[in-house]
Amino acid sequence: MSSNEVADQQELDALFPVPSLPPSPLSPQRFPGSSLESVAALQHVLKDNHNRYHIFFNYVRFHDHAGYRALAIYALGGSASLIKNYYEQDGKNQRPAVKSPGPITEENFVEHLGDENFYQGYVTFFNKQIDEKGAAGTLEEFIFSEKYNFQDGRDATRQPEMLFRLMDGLLHPMIHVGYGIEFGLKGMLAEGLALCACTGRGDLLSSLVFNAKPAATPILSKIGGVHAFDIIARMLKDDQLKPKGGRDLVFQWKDVLAELGTAGEIERKMEELIWVSSVTYGVGGFDAEKEFTPDFYLCPIPSLLDRIPFSTIASLSLAFLPHIGPNLIQRAFAHSNTLYGLRPAGYFAGTELEGAELLDGSLFVRAAIHTADSMGWVWDGKDTKTWSMEPGGIS
């Protein structure tokens, strides 16, 4: 092996070390079953995927999920052979990596935002930034700072808007960044930030921020504060949210965000969002006369809401979690059941959402079983199906 090859291997080892332990009790815990062989298989997948494939597996910007699946299988205690076999399947659909037309620097960082051809350039740039500033410092500067969101002298169509980009693309940049944080993988974090930089501007979020008008004094729930179920109930009654309705919504967030300074409120809001997203996916996909529909556009939500980097909690107050694929959403439901599975019926009786008093902690197990029944129980030898890309059936 040449000196260059040794250096390349050492760099890959630094990008994708043995995964760290969960950063918080709120993060999904690791299932028994990991071994030296499964760790080696996982590292091989992450390194090979990093070198060989583009972050978008096609030209309409569908995201590479191979690393997500490998990490979820590992975290669920899956074997080395299972990790390798699924990666072989995922590799059949991938698009080869392309060399960046040039390097990314702080001087030209904004000029190439949204250009997927510069993906590798952004990966290299963020690797260096993480080495210099650490994960938290890099996120604070390139996601949350004013400089990398809005700059004087630029018109609205040329603003960096990195925070909006993080949440665009069906939340995939945030999911990818979250995996890097949860598993302590510098390479995954750099990939996620590069994906963020190559994702289009968040036009909807931008319009909400700049075109909204302040809302009236907030209405508080009977149980104190504004519960996420209250917001859902109000959305269902809000004419602005009907097709072709107006969108003056952003300042309605203020009554909720104002509560986040209270001790323990971040954790309570995270639980509320997990319940809302799980109800949206589980109940929204259920039809007594048809089979359960595992909706692709709803599955990222429960998968996203169990992890949060507390160093940036005041800036974002959003959580990170695993995503996409039945094994990944099952991991989310397993963790949610561990945290909230003993909630009794009537726990949400004080909220404004009709029928919320009937919900109990069995929601997560029920949603997990419906998902497995619809998509296939792999160990039973059944053919598996993929997510439904539109309401009404599975593909």
Image: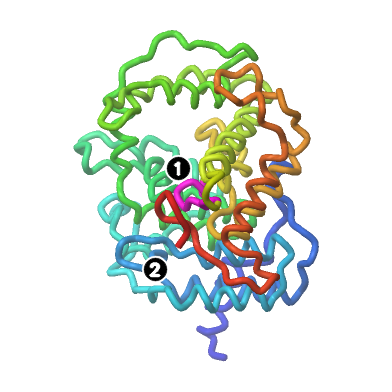
Q: From the viewer's perspective, is residue 54 above or below residue 184? A: below
Residue 202 falls inside the magenta stretch: no
Please state which of residues 307 and 364 is positioned toward the viewer in this rendering.
Answer: 364
Q: Which residue lies furthest to the bottom in this view?
A: 1
Other-residue count near label 1 (Cα within 10 Å), few / some / many at <14 / 14–19 / ≥20: some
Residue 29 lies, in percent from the top left, at 73, 51
Residue 294 falls inside the magenta stretch: yes
What residue did someone put label 2 on?
57
Label at residue 141: 1
Give the amino acid type for the residue marked by disc 1 in the picture.
Answer: Glu
Taking the spot 53% from the left edge, 84% from the top edge, the residue there is 5
The segment highlighted magenta reads 292-300
Give the amino acid type for the residue marked by disc 2 in the picture.
Answer: Phe
- Give left or right: position of 121 versus 294: left
Give the secondary structure at mark 1: helix
Task: State which quarter of the image contains the N terminus.
Answer: bottom right
Please state which of residues 368 and 100 is positioned toward the viewer in this rendering.
Answer: 368
Q: Are the residues flagged by discs 1 and 2 in contact, CB closer than 8 Å? A: no
